[in-house]
Amino acid sequence: MVRVGAVLLLVLAISLTAYLLATVPFGVAVVAAIAAIALSIHVLLTSSEVARYVQDYDNTPHQRPDSG
C-alpha cells in the first residue's frame, strides 16, 4: 500500500514538473522538478526497505518469555 502511495507521489512530481515548465522560469522549474522527483524516489526506496525489514522480522522466529 505504501508503494502505491509512493508511485502516486512520483506521478504527481512528474505532473508538477510539466506544470512548472509551463508557468515559471526554466531554472526554477528544473530545480523544483529535481527536488520533487528526488523526494518521490526517496520515499519509494525507503518504503521498499521498510517493507523488506518488516517481512524479515515477521519471518524470524522469536522467543517468548516463560509465563509461569
Image (spheres, helix red, strand yellow):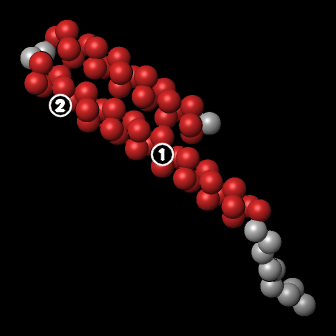
Whole-percent x, y for residue 42 in the image: 40, 44
Secondary element at image label 1:
helix
Q: How many labels does the image show?
A: 2
43 relative to 19 in the view: left or right? right
The residue lying at 39 percent from left, 36 percent from top is 40
Residue 42 against residue 62 in the figure, above or below: above
Whole-percent x, y for residue 66 in the image: 85, 87
Q: Residue furthest bottom?
A: 68
60 relative to 4 in the view: left or right? right
The residue lying at 41 percent from left, 38 percent from top is 41
Label annotation for residue 31? 2
17 relative to 52 in the view: left or right? left
Residue 18 against residue 46 in the figure, above or below: above
Q: How crowded is mark 2: few (under 14 residues within 10 Å), some or many (20 or more)?
A: few
Residue 31 against residue 23 in the figure, above or below: below
Secondary element at image label 2:
helix
Q: Which amino acid does label 1 sit on?
A: Leu
The residue lying at 69 percent from left, 64 percent from top is 57
Whole-percent x, y for residue 38 in the image: 33, 38
Whole-percent x, y for residue 34 in the image: 25, 32
Q: Which of 63 and 33 is in front in this view?
A: 33
Q: Which of 12 and 45 is in front in this view?
A: 45
Q: Which amino acid does label 2 sit on?
A: Val
The residue lying at 20 percent from left, 14 percent from top is 21
Residue marked by disc 1: 45
Between the residue at mark 2 and the residue at mark 1, the CA separation in whole angstroms equals 21 Å
